[in-house]
Image (cartoon, grey):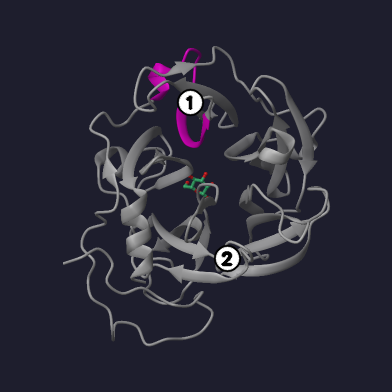
C-alpha cells in the first residue's frame, strides 16, 4: 500500500461524502522519529525550567538553530536558542533566556510569549519571528526581527486576540507580505486558518480564510492552525497544520499537510485527508498536556526534512522525512 492514495482536493469549505474513494494510507510513514528522542528536556536546561517544547527551527550558516519555548515555574513562557552543527545532537543552549517577554514595554506580553515561527527575509537579510504574546485579553500574534539572534527589534502586536499560530512567507505577493494566522471568534469552538496581507508588516488587511477546519468525525474537525513556517518547494508552498480533535476522554493534536500555489498562496492546491503524524510515543502521549505533537519549525536540508516538535508540551523531539516522498504523496492527493 502506498502512502496516502487519496486526499481531499478542496480546502474543506464544501461538504463531501466521506469515505467513498478513500483507501487507507498506512500509519503515517512519511515521518520517522529520531532514535535519540526526546532531543531536549527541561533537565538539559542551563537554568531552571518547567518544560521546553514547540521550537521554531531554521538553518543559520549551516547550523541548526531552534528557538525553544521554555515555560518557567510561574507557568509563563519565553524563548531560548539552542544550536547544533548536525541538527540531531550536541545542542548548545543559551545560558539565559534569549528572548524574554517584555511586559513593561509591550503589555500584550503580560503572561509571556510562546510558539515562535521564524522566516528569513532575503530582501532584508533578516530573520522575522512571529510569536504568540499572551495578553490579559488572550493570545495574539506579534512580530520581531533579528540579524544574529542576540539583538531583537520588536514590531509589536500585529493582530488582536484571540489569535495565534502565525508565520510569515519569505517573499511578497504583488508587493505585499503575507501572514498565516488562526483567529478564534468569541465563544466559538470552531477555528479556521486565515491569511492576511500587508505592505509594511504592521498594518494587516485583505483577511481571508485559507483553510477551513473540517467537521464531524474528521481528525481535523473544529480547530486547525499552522504549525511550522511555510516551506517553498518546486510544487508549491508546503504547509503543515495541526488539527485538534476532542473525544470523550481527551484532546488529541495531529498533523496534516497542504500545498499552496507559489504565486497566489490563497489558492489551496492539495490537502491531505489523513493526518501524517500524531502522538504515539510516551513522550508525545504523557506530559504537561497529554497527546500533543506540536512542531513550530522544520528545515529542508537537501532532500531531508527535519521537523522539530514539542512532545506533550514537555520536551523537544525530532522526526525526519524525504522531501521527494512528501511531494510524491501530495501529488497523489
Ligand atoms: C495550543 C498551543 C500550543 C500547545 C497546544 C497544546 O493551543 O497553545 O502551544 O502546545 O495548545 O497544549
In screen coordinates, is 53 left or right of 206?
left
Give residue 283's position: percent from left, percent from top.
30, 37
Quickly name the residue at label 1.
62
The stretch drawn in magenta includes residue 53? yes
Neighbor class of circle 2 (other Cα within 10 Å; few <14, some 14-19, many 20+) is many
Q: How many marks?
A: 2
User: Who comes first in sequence, dot 1 or dot 2?
Assistant: 1
Q: Residue at x 73, y 49 (%)?
A: 137
Mark 2 element type: loop
The quadrant of the image that shows the C terminus is: bottom left
The answer to whether residue 277 of the structure is visible from this angle is no
The answer to whether residue 16 of the structure is visible from this angle is yes
The residue nearer to you, when weighing 132 against 104, is 132
The quadrant of the image that shows the N terminus is: bottom left
Q: Which mark is residue 95?
A: none
Gap between marks 1 and 2 measured at Cα: 37 Å
Task: Using the image, determine if residue 240 lies above or below residue 4.
Answer: above
Q: Residue at x 33, y 70 (%)?
A: 332
Give residue 240's position: percent from left, percent from top.
46, 55
In screen coordinates, is 143 left or right of 49?
right
Ligand 1 near label 1 (Cβ, under 8 Å)? Answer: no
Neighbor class of circle 1 (other Cα within 10 Å; few <14, some 14-19, many 20+) is few
- Picture quadrant where residue 265 is located: bottom right
Question: Which stretch is magenta?
Answer: 41-59
Quickly name the residue at label 2.
191
- Picture quadrant where residue 331 is located: bottom left
Amino acid at each position: 500500500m502506498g502512502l496516502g492514495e487519496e486526499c481531499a482536493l478542496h480546502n474543506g469549505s464544501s461538504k463531501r461524502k466521506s469515505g467513498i474513494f478513500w483507501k487507507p494510507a498506512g500509519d503515517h510513514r512519511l515521518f520517522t522519529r529520531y532514535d535519540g528522542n526526546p532531543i531536549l528536556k527541561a533537565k538539559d536546561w542551563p537554568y531552571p525550567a518547567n518544560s521546553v517544547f514547540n521550537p521554531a527551527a531554521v538553518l543559520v550558516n549551516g547550523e541548526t538553530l531552534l528557538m525553544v519555548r521554555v515555560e518557567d515555574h510561574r507557568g509563563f513562557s519565553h524563548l531560548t536558542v539552542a544550536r547544533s552543527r548536525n541538527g540531531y545532537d550536541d545542542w548548545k543552549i543559551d545560558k539565559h533566556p534569549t528572548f524574554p517577554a517584555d511586559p513593561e514595554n509591550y503589555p500584550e506580553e503580560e503572561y509571556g510569549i510562546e510558539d515562535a515561527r521564524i522566516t528569513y527575509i532575503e530582501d532584508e537579510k533578516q530573520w522575522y519571528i512571529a510569536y504568540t504574546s499572551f495578553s490579559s485579553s488572550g493570545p495574539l500574534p506579534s512580530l520581531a526581527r533579528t540579524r544574529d539572534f542576540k539583538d531583537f527589534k520588536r514590531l509589536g502586536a500585529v493582530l488582536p486576540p484571540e489569535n495565534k499560530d502565525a508565520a510569515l512567507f519569505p517573499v511578497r505577493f504583488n508587493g505585499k507580505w503575507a501572514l498565516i494566522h488562526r483567529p478564534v471568534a468569541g465563544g466559538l469552538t470552531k477555528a479556521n486558518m486565515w491569511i492576511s496581507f500587508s505592505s509594511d508588516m504592521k498594518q494587516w488587511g485583505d483577511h481571508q480564510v485559507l483553510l477551513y477546519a473540517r467537521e464531524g468525525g474528521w481528525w481535523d474537525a473544529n480547530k486547525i492552525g499552522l504549525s511550522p513556517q511555510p516551506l517553498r518547494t518546486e510544487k508549491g508552498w508546503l504547509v503543515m497544520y495541526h488539527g485538534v480533535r476532542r473525544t470523550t476522554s481527551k484532546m488529541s493534536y495531529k498533523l496534516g499537510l497542504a500545498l499552496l500555489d507559489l504565486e497566489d498562496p490563497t489558492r489551496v492546491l492539495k490537502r491531505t485527508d489523513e493526518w501524517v503524524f500524531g502522538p504515539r510515543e510516551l513522550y508525545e502521549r504523557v506530559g504537561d498536556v497529554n497527546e500533543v505533537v506540536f512542531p513550530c519549525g522544520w528545515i529542508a536540508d537537501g532532500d531531508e526534512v527535519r521537523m522539530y516538535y514539542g512532545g506533550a508540551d514537555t520536551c523537544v523531539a525530532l522526526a525526519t522525512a524525504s522531501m521527494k516522498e512528501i511531494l510524491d504523496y501530495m501529488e497523489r492527493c
